[in-house]
Amino acid sequence: MNQPRLGWKKMQLSDREIQNTLDLLKKKEKMGEGKEAILLSEKEIKGIQEVVKQIDSVPEVRKDKVQKIKKAIESSSYDVTGDDIAKKLVGRMISDKLH
């Protein structure tokens, strides 16, 4: 079939990666006297806050993506091979282990 495949965004974060990042940020916020500290510029802090805000605004289930896939399945145009699925699963597992 010559129809375009449903694509992935350039960057995907797993739930574990997001949680690890948030845990790290919380840990750094709780740092007390006598512990290592990181100095961040106001620009860096605002950048981090913006990323956290964007992550918080993303729903756990992306309804738009679910609808797109559902329509593709119903019209028999959803074409994903077992290799594609296996590669994605293994890639996510490796990524989660590294983070």
Image (tube, rainbow, N blue to C red):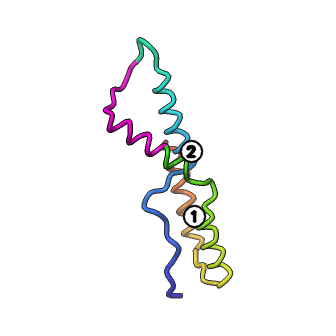
Residue at image point 33% right, 31% down: 40
Can you say whether 17 is above or below 35 in the image? below
Residue 20 counted in the magenta span? no
Residue 41 coordinates in the image, percent (x, y)? 31, 32
User: Number of callouts in the render?
Assistant: 2
Say what secondary structure mark 2 lies in: helix
- For residue 45, above or below residue 59: above
Amino acid type of disc 2? Answer: Arg
Asked if 18 appears above or below 88 in the picture, the reply is: above
Q: Nearer the viewer, residue 19 or 39?
A: 39
- For label 1, the SS is helix
Outermost residue on the top side: it is: 34
Please give the range of residues in magenta: 36-52
Residue at image coords 43%, 12%: 33
- For marks 2 and 1 on the same chain, the one whose residue lies earlier in the sequence: 2
Q: Which secondary structure is most common in the magenta stretch?
A: helix
In the image, which disc is placed on residue 16? 2
- Residue 11: x and y in percent read 44, 57
Residue position for label 1 = 86
Is residue 65 toward the left or the right of residue 42 in the image?
Answer: right
Of 68 and 57, the residue lying toward us = 57
Q: Residue furthest bottom?
A: 1
| Residue occupying image coordinates x 60% and y 61% | 62
Instruction: Pick the quarter of the image with the N terminus.
Output: bottom right
